[in-house]
Image (cartoon, rainbow, N blue to C red):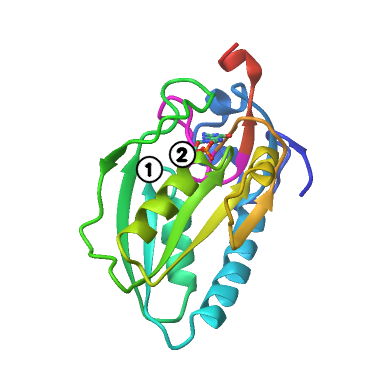
Amino acid sequence: MVSRHVGGSTNPQTRLADVDAKHVAADLDHVIVTADEIAAKVTEMAEQIDADYAGRDVLLVGVLNGAVMVMSDLSRAMRIHLTMDWMAVSSYGAGTKSSGVVRILKDLTTDVLDKHVLIVEDIVDTGLTLSYLADNLRGRGAATVEIAAMFRKPAALTTDVDVKYIGFDIPNDFVVGYGLDFNGHYRNLRDVAVLGKHMYQ
Ligand code: 5GP
């Protein structure tokens, strides 16, 4: 994982021009993970998950809205039988700090009793959201509950949330792209970048 200045990529797949270069580049500090690096990691994670769940049906539970991209890519990279469902929980509001309050805004439509559940999440920061969700789904009688997250921040390492499949460990900066937003924007960036501090300070 290499830090890059925004706009430094020559790969057409990873150009921030995919969104609105002039606008977006000024909002961001630097790219930390490119679209190509994410794609390679998704393949690696999918192979591992396929191997671990061989012979079992898995229910992927995506956490809205941030996990939309990783769910979409990961599920299509997987080769085993799977079903998908979604939950929405409150996490960050309009700022960049975790509120610590986890509230279910949209529940599953699937009964998880005796199912092998794999929670798919964009990023784990404090781990509050995921430890709440994992406990909640275990409480409903799921056979197994594991977690896959594309990004993990240092704080997550000090909590007891067990993320079985992890894409990238990243520094403790507020990042956007690949599903991750700031005030609803930047989710459609293909790269993941650190948001410029001038955007929220
Ligand atoms: P946790 O409960 O682990 O503290 O927070 C998890 C949620 O916080 C993520 O699903 C995501 O919505 C949000 N979050 C944490 N760090 C970041 C970040 O750097 N950027 C964005 N956009 N969201 C973040």
Quadrant placement of the C terminus: top right
| Residue beneath the point at 61% across and 42% down | 192
Q: Is residue 36 left or right of residue 131?
A: right
Mark 2 element type: loop
| Residue closest to the eye, 14 or 164 | 164
Q: Residue furthest bottom?
A: 55
| Residue beneath the point at 43% across and 21% down | 94
Q: Looking at the picture, which amino acid does disc 2 mark?
A: Arg
Crowding around mark 1 (Cα neighbors within 10 Å: few <14, some 14 to 19, many 20+) is some
How far from the left and from the top, in percent, is residue 95? 48, 20
Assess whether residue 181 is covered by the magenta stretch: yes
Crowding around mark 2 (Cα neighbors within 10 Å: few <14, some 14 to 19, many 20+) is many
| Residue closest to the eye, 147 or 144 | 144
How far from the left and from the top, in percent, is residue 158? 68, 42
Q: Are marks 2 and 1 in contact (CB under 8 Å)?
A: yes
Does residue 197 sit above or below 6 in this rendering?
A: above
**Figure disc tally:** 2
Q: Which mark is residue 187?
A: 2
Mark 2 beta carbon near ligand 1 (under 8 Å): no
Assess whether residue 39 is covered by the magenta stretch: no
How far from the left and from the top, in percent, is residue 197? 64, 18
| Residue closest to the eye, 64 or 69 | 64
Q: Is residue 18 left or right of residue 89?
A: right
| Residue beneath the point at 57% across and 50% down | 161
Q: Which mark is residue 189?
A: none
Mark 1 element type: loop
Q: Which residue is mark 1?
A: 65
Q: Looking at the picture, which amino acid does disc 1 mark?
A: Asn
Does residue 30 sit above or below 119 in this rendering?
A: above
